[in-house]
Image (tube, grey):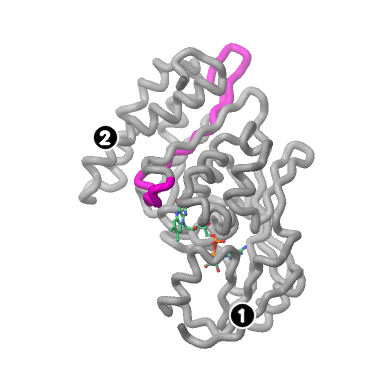
Amino acid sequence: MKEFSFFSPGTLDEALSLLSQHKDSVSVIAGGTDIVLELNERAHTAQAVVDISKIKDLRYVKVVDGVVRIGALSTFTDLENDPYIRDHVKSLYSACYYVGSPQIRNLGTIGGNVANASVAGDTPTALISLDATVVLRSAAGKREMKITDFYSGAGKTQLEKDELLTEIYFDAPTENMATAYTKLGKRKALVIVVIGLAVLLERDCNNICSKAQVVIGAVARYPKRLPSIEHYLVGKPITKETFEGCRDMFSQIVYDMIPTRASVGYKKESVKGVANKTFNSILKDFSLSGGEE
Ligand SMILES: Cc1cc2nc3c(=O)[nH]c(=O)nc-3n(C[C@H](O)[C@H](O)[C@H](O)COP(=O)(O)OP(=O)(O)OC[C@H]3O[C@@H](n4cnc5c(N)ncnc54)[C@H](O)[C@@H]3O)c2cc1C
């Protein structure tokens, strides 16, 4: 490992001041589950490393005025154990629940998962379906943007070297909404996501779909909204038959995203099962027939 100066600030202001001083050659560590491997492999050659894990003020989940606010240092375990997330934001709960092993979930943070912008990240797919906003802070101030705008290409984000991702927030799902996330891969086997599918649906008092936010992860180089599926769902009754009617569309979308990739045959078939499972979970949440047992 290359030598570097190590800092472990206890407050956000201290951390931002350190980032500002060392911005020409600095790396941030939160839980360390991604970046420590990279530091060991010398993929990072920063002269300064700022460990932000002791900043307690960045570890929270709260719901204020209908908005869910999550501090960037909240771990997957924090989110999995949070009763509000478990009961009201099932997509995000499932995305956290299916991450790696207990050790990784205890250390890995949602901020690190979002900032790392890995094609195999679970929470970005769920957060895009929730239309989340990210908050970035530097010593110079604060900026906010939709998480879809935060990603600027494969593995790339809008984060500047002197900035920290401090918070992620989204509108709290209402009573007439249901959310779900399905990961193709095995829990506790450290399997990297093969397909991730996150859905948020809203229905009106006649059980007609009034809003659909559908995101697929791990197929293209970053998670993508699926406007054609969303368009198909809006205006239709929320039933098993409606959902079955778009299974082949998922298959075609996956094929169109990766027509020459070796995995295309497997992914275009398995996405139908992933869609099935996700929509069954939505039916169950709405207490409609056809939902999972
Ligand atoms: C064995 C194993 C299994 C895994 N399984 C999964 C899985 O199933 N699903 C999944 O999604 N991921 C998985 N991961 C990846 C990893 O655990 C997650 O991406 C994790 O959320 C990263 O968070 P962290 O706090 O450990 O980030 P770190 O490793 O500390 O940092 C990751 C990157 O984000 C930057 N960063 C971190 N926090 C901030 C911040 N607040 N502001 C600005 N930049 C920041 C760092 O500088 C670094 O570039 C796995 C990793 C391992 C080693």
Q: Are marks 2 and 1 in contact (CB under 8 Å)?
A: no
Residue 35 image offset from top left, x and y in percent = 50, 69
Q: Secondary structure at mark 2?
A: helix
Which mark, by number, is residue 8?
none
- Residue 196 inside the magenta-drawn segment: yes
Q: Is the residue marked 1 within 8 Å of ligand 1, measured from its CB?
A: no
On the image, numbered disc 2 is attached to which residue?
269
Q: How many marks?
A: 2
Residue at image position (58%, 26%) is: 202
Range of the magenta residues?
188-210
Residue 4 image offset from top left, x and y in percent = 56, 86
- Of 12 and 268, nearer the camera is 12
Marks 2/1: CA–CA distance: 46 Å
- Residue 86 inside the magenta-drawn segment: no
On the image, numbered disc 1 is attached to which residue?
23
Residue at image position (45%, 22%) is: 292
- Of 213 and 119, nearer the camera is 119
Residue 262 image offset from top left, x and y in percent = 21, 50
- Of 173 and 35, nearer the camera is 35
Q: Secondary structure at mark 1?
A: loop
Residue 195 appears in which quarter of the rendering? Answer: top left
Residue at image position (75%, 74%) is: 14
Mark 2 surroundings: few (<14), some (14-19) or many (≥20) residues within 10 A: some
